[in-house]
Image: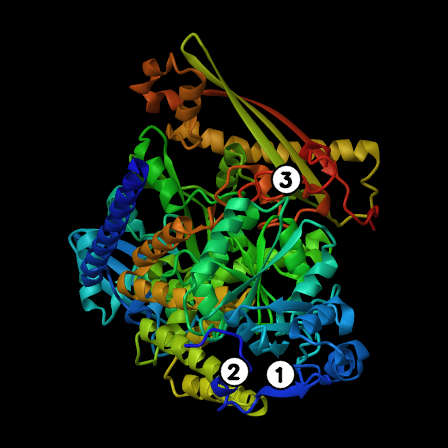
Amino acid sequence: MKNKDRLRKYERICTNMKKLVLILFAFLLSGCSHDMNRREIDEINFVHVMGIDYSNGEYTLTAIYSSSQGADPEGGGGDEESSQGRGASPFEAFQDLRLKNKKSLSIANTGCFIIGDSAAKKGIDTCVDFLSRDETVKMEALLFICKDVKASDFINDSMDRGQVVHEDLEAVEQKQKELVTRNDNTLVNILNDIENEMTSLLIPYLIAEENAFLLKGYAVFDKLILVDYLDMNTSSGVNFLKNIIRAYPIYLDDGIGLSVTYSKSKLRSNIENNQIEVEIHLDFETMVKEINSSENIFDFKTLEELTEKQNDYILDIVRKATNYSIETGRDILQLSRLIQNQHSKGWEKYEEDWNSRVSEVQYSFLVNSKVSKSFILRSGR
Amino acid sequence: MENRINSTWLKELFSKSGDVLVRPIKINQNNISVHLFCVDGLINQALFDEAVFRSLKFDPYLAHCSTERQMMDYLQEGGAYHVFTIEEDDYELLIKYVLSGMVALIFDAEEKAIVYDIRMFEKRSIQEPTEENVMKGSKESFIEVMRMNTALIRRRIRSEYLVVETHSVGRLSKTDIALIYISNIADASIVNKIRETINKIDIDNLSTPAFIEEFLIENKHSIFPQIMYTQRPDRVAANLSDGRIALVVDGIPFAYILPCQLPMLMQSPDDYANHFLIGSSLRIIRYLSMIVTLFLPAFYIAATTFQSQMLPVQLALSTQAAKQNVPFSSAFEVLGLLIAFEILIEAGLRLPKAVGTAMSILGGLVVGQSAVSANLISPAVVVIVALAGISGFIMPNQDLSSGVRLMRFFLAILASLAGFFGLVIGIIVLITHLCSLNNYGTAYLSPFVDVEERNIKDTLFRFPIKYFKTRPEDIVHLNRTKQGNGNEKQG
């Protein structure tokens, strides 16, 4: 009997609890439905691309979104519209942009942020700070610098030429993915890199050429301020050392074209008598893509010669990156992280005057490579 | 009220019923007459004439009997050529027997009757199952006659342990219900509980299956079916051998199976008729369909009204472009179209087949296309609702399908109130509700909620038959071995 009473009591409590939970849910829902950012999807302008500029003491934000009139229900792309907002800070400019727009603006789907030369020279951290605090922003969004021009001019000129900016930028992303194994210029990566003041921040820069956007290399930031643009070869050298090469073309003088299909680099640091030595071990494989000569290159001797030539070719590229680092004292190879990881005890000694130390780093190289034959075997012409 | 067996009283009782016959038959020279008491149309007249009436009229022994007692004894000892004979002195039982189609001979002086079971009435022949048809497998399905259905089961389980208990339910209808189980496998406590539930049913008439279902289920407020029905005797046999209990109700062309769990309702006879990989794939599709039909409309509302940032860019843009000129909110569009979908289904069911097809074309294609062209609804919503609707019908059990269809309204309303937050609350409520359902001592979500790995071999995936070594642990506590020595590791 006691057990039955207890069971009944327990059931009564459970029933009451259920009612209580239902009432709580009802309250919660009615409370939430008042302000849950309720906005129909057609009342929003999804910003595809945003440009950030700085001039005359104020920031200018240029947003590109699909035109509501020209939207194509089947394709989803349609015409692009742009609008601008101005303010003393990027956030103020963004608020101005929101106010000027007919519809609500959302940067939740923005795939690309272009930072103008002047804004980058003012400081990258100021440009991206408001983005990092937006809960809707896509952290995989890519950041690009536009070389020597304002982002607004870069965007508007492209639109005037009839380019669909966000589609062309998607094409850039695709091309980038064809060459490297990962895009390091995502918002989340850059926000992480900003935290580390020892290394130089590298962000790819864009140039507009013949109705297309081209990636030419890295823009170098020192203390979060744009200081230089690397040329294509130096940037490729950095990519080799960052271990992110997916494919890279090699053009040798004797009419032979090769493509790097595999690459792996290992950086090992040694500290002797306060001198930092970095040993770079680079292994890569190539595949013959083009032979514009009548010679048979697939005999042992010629292949050895070819291997040496391609080693020299890549070594030259990698040396450009290391030489730049030595000449400018900018840690574009993220050596500070390497030393921190490999010599955690001794790192404190170098931390204070790291920038001067970068120029004194001695590099040694060990390059190994292999030439793979193309699928259709054919000795030259 | 007269409770004696007497022909005069019975005549008076049924004087207004043209189909109930109480007729005197004079059978011997000592002027002893008996009264025939039967319902016209429910008896096999030819058999009665041959086996009973002929003996009564022409048997010389009967012609010389001096008392009714002598005649009764003789008739029961083989005087009439029919084996299903009982002597009855209970008035209530006699009425019940005769009204269920038996024939009684009333002996007024003895106040007793001899009852012959020579029932015969018009019935459907055994046909292919309409809902659970399979390519490979039995084509037999239950019909409306209980005894025929129990025979179909008995033919598949030729064990002395198969018990078919007959109960009568309904004050007026006196519907026969067969409680079927395998006595050395089924859990006695569950059998007792179901038997008690049947005996407690106090209703005039069990007119529809839903009546008995409501009496049998333990959680009456849940929209999820807690009792499985099947048209297939082989499915009943398989479940009986798993330790479950079947109920066959006279007048209902399917059997009920208890205790029922959600995974059972997602199983189809096809799963076992095909290779286990094909069976598993079909089952996964069914579960995916359930997720689609439950959550897709709500997800669309939440994603287009509250958290549009969750959509990939291209999808967001195409959804936005499709909705550009539609005057209604996404929630209104989806809920409206879901209701229209239900109306179409109802209309299709009520209308004659030929008109129903035309209705579907008119309603689904013409009206749908016109509504999209007139910018009343966006094409995306049509796709979402159509996908959810079709997915809802993939479930093998129509009761589950109906429950899920109702549930998706609830989730869609929650999503239109608070977006994904509301949807998540809905999912929590749904899962909590499903977890709380108890069906004759077993969890409704069992074996998903079990930690025992051996119990999940016939749930999301259909493992090869060699792995089904034991019966479900939560249903059968003794005699659990199904194959071999029941050792799982030897599988």
**Which is in the foreground here, disc 3 or disc 1?**
1
Residue at the extreme top: A273
Residue B310: x and y in percent read 38, 57
According to the image, label 1 marks what residue?
A: B35
Q: Nearer the viewer, residue A208 or B208?
A: B208
Quadrant in the picture for residue B99 = bottom right
Residue position for label 2:
B10
Q: Quadrant of the N terminus of chain B?
A: bottom left
Q: What's the residue type where badge 3 is placed?
A: Arg
Q: Quote the CA–CA distance across marks 3 and 1.
A: 55 Å
Q: Secondary structure at mark 1?
A: strand
Residue at image position (72%, 55%) is B157
Mark 3 or mark 1: whose residue is earlier in sequence: 1
Query: B10 or B469, which lies in front?
Result: B10
Label 3 resides on the chain identified as B
Q: Which mark is residue B480?
A: 3
Label 2, residues with CA under 10 Å away: few <14, some 14-19, many ≥20: many
Please give left or right for residue A256 compared with residue A246 in the image.
right
Label 1 crowding class (10 Å Cα cut-off): few <14, some 14-19, many 20+?
Answer: many
Are the residues flagged by discs 3 and 1 from a single subunit?
Answer: yes
Residue B280 lies, in percent from the top left, at 64, 53
**Residue placed most toward the observer, A145 or B206:** B206
Q: Amino acid at mark 2?
A: Leu
